[in-house]
Image: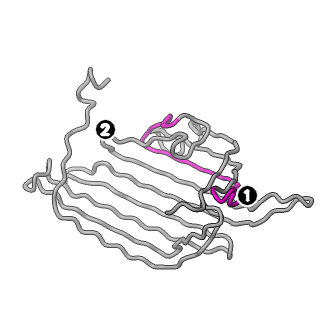
Amino acid sequence: DVDENPDNLPSDRRFSGPQISVELIETDFQSASYIDRFERVEDYNLGNVLGTSMQISPQGWYSADNYLLFGLSDSDGMRISESSFIRGAGSFFGRTDFDRFENMILGCDLRYYNNIGLVNWLGIDLGSHTLASSLSLDQGEILDKDRQFLLGADNGLRGYAARLFDGDQVVLFSLEDRVFFIENVLRIFNFGGAIFFDAGGAGSSGIGDIVTDELHTDIGIGLRIGLPRSSG
């Protein structure tokens, strides 16, 4: 308990100093609809995006200590067909006080989309279908005491309470069939649904132990409502 043990409180942190960031962007856009926003066409960059940053925070510049903060990220995509593609991203962030590394976070994310299109079964129109799948992994080492990974209904693991699971590592897999039934109802909203399967977990004993011992799953259906006249 923090009230009984002040050592559980995170240490003061203040970083001040020059920062250098470099980003290399390769453009290779694929336009697609019925991914997230019904009939609205969205552009997805499948080109490589590489970014890196470094900040020097000396104590003489009012930082809490002498620190070097660093980060590296990379994302890329691949066009599988005219209606399907895959995108992946990875990142690594952390800092060092030149004695040890702290708050190191490694993240990976992989997403797949396949716009199947209109489905008709025995003469019955079943709407437009899109298959969406994602896999994300986050690994933390020597995290700040006020930093942890949370998992629940609010960030991908549907069917469970928000922020129910926590730890230094988290894994989440999702597979869903997004169905788009009716568009421009009263010129106000679009109506659809989804059949989904989620599996994920969080802990501190390693990704392997989470997958074998602490993995939580859920299967369900949900509604999807879009506002075609909204901006953004």
Q: Residues within 10 Å of mark 2 (few under 14, many from 20)?
A: few
Residue appearing at x 85%, y 62% in the figure: 120
Q: Secondary structure at mark 2?
A: loop
SS class, disc 1: strand
77 vs 217, left or right, is: left
Extreme right residue here?
122
Q: Which residues are magenta?
A: 162-188
Q: Residue at x 31, y 72 (%)?
A: 22
Look at the image and say whether residue 175 sits in the magenta stretch.
yes
Locate residue 149, reporting x and y percent.
43, 43
Q: Provide the major secondary structure of the magenta segment.
A: strand
In 3D space, how far apart are the residues under numbered discs 2 and 1 (Cα atoms)?
48 Å
Q: Which mark is residue 18?
A: none
- Name the residue tied to disc 2: 145
Label 2 or label 1, whichever lies nearer to me, is 1
Three-letter amino acid code at the position of disc 1: Ile
Q: Position of residue 155 (x, y in %)?
A: 51, 46
Q: Position of residue 31 (x, y in %)?
A: 59, 74
Marker disc for residue 182: 1
Residue visible at 47% across and 68% down?
75
**In magenta stretch: residue 113:** no
Sequence-first disc among 2 and 1: 2
